[in-house]
Amino acid sequence: MNSMSDLSTMGHAALCGSGAILALAGATWILSVVKRDVSIVDSVWSLLILLAALTYAATLAAVGPRAPWLLALALLWAARLAGYITWRNWGEPEDHRYQAIRARNQPNFAFKSLWLVFGLQGVLAAIVSLPLLAALASARPVNGLDAAGIALCVFGLLFETVGDWQLARFKADPANRGRVMDGGLWRYTRHPNYFGEFCVWWGFYLVALAAGGFWTIVSPLLMSLLLLKVSGVALLEKDIGLRRPAYRDYVARTSAFFPRPPKGAL
């Protein structure tokens, strides 16, 4: 996008998308106060980004040739992730990670969670969604880099879907109670769901790059940081070895993130 009017239009769409994100995050916060469970934010995370994308498409003066399949991919990704997390957490108590945050921020955590949890998630969602804005706004013709981005995005979506399905089947078998899932994709990476998310967002970035949105690299870099060092692998495994001693052996032989054969395998 070159003209000042184009930049102004994209800026307006970004503001509208951010407003929509914060409105949904605020509504979810109210529900969390009623339920006394802030972990419902995990179910809404992908919907925040999808809402931003739909708002971008609705408020841009015109959308480019990538809009139909880009929005379809975003919808598929968001619906799958929101649906799976909601199903997984249904009827369960507040996630232990959020219980720890709640304990550290008393008194008045219910009010503090508005910015500590929901406001923060909203800001992160706005940043992560930037490749979708750049790709939707661009009139550049679709090219080979788009194909690479779509392929990587679809691969990531399939990878995380298969990983989640394998884990759900494993947990559904009473014989596996107390055991560590180390079969299927989980044999090659301890977090196929996180690796899949990594691929999805680098795929979306390649599409944005094809559209001229090189500056949106902040999105996949931020997502990679979150998955590897903040709310993903690092947080999930912070004390899991203490809670599940068998997991320590799994850690010793299995890659934390990028898939590879386990140590000692032929």
Image (cartoon, rainbow, N blue to C red):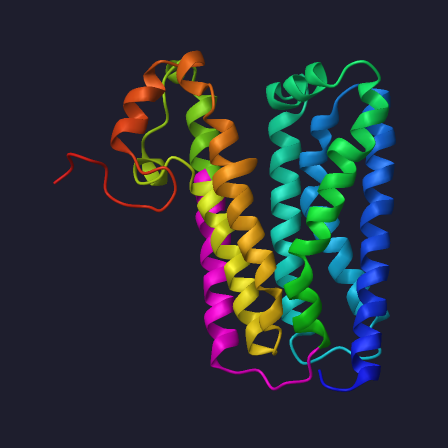
Q: Is residue 120 above or below residue 236?
A: below
**At 61% from the left edge and 52% from the top edge, which residue is drawn?**
77
Q: Is residue 73 above or below residue 237?
A: below
Of the 4 image quadrants, the one containing the N terminus is: bottom right
Q: Quadrant of residue 219?
A: bottom right
**At 52% from the left edge and 83% from the top edge, which residue is drawn?**
143
Q: Residue 21: give x, y in percent of width and height.
A: 80, 49
Total numbered labels placed on residues in the image: 0
**At 67% from the left edge and 35% from the top edge, which residue is drawn?**
42
Residue 92 is at least partly visible in this image? no
- Residue 155 inside the magenta-drawn segment: yes
- Residue 255 inside the magenta-drawn segment: no
**At 62% from the left edge and 73% from the top edge, which residue is drawn?**
213
Residue 249 is at least partly visible in this image? yes
223 displayed left or right of 185: right
89 displayed left or right of 264: right
Of the 4 image quadrants, the one containing the C terminus is: top left
10 displayed left or right of 97: right
> Observer-nearest residue: 42 or 75?
42
| Magenta extent | 138-163
Q: Residue 88: give x, y in percent of width and height.
A: 60, 29
264 displayed left or right of 190: left
Q: Residue 124: give x, y in percent of width and height.
A: 69, 47
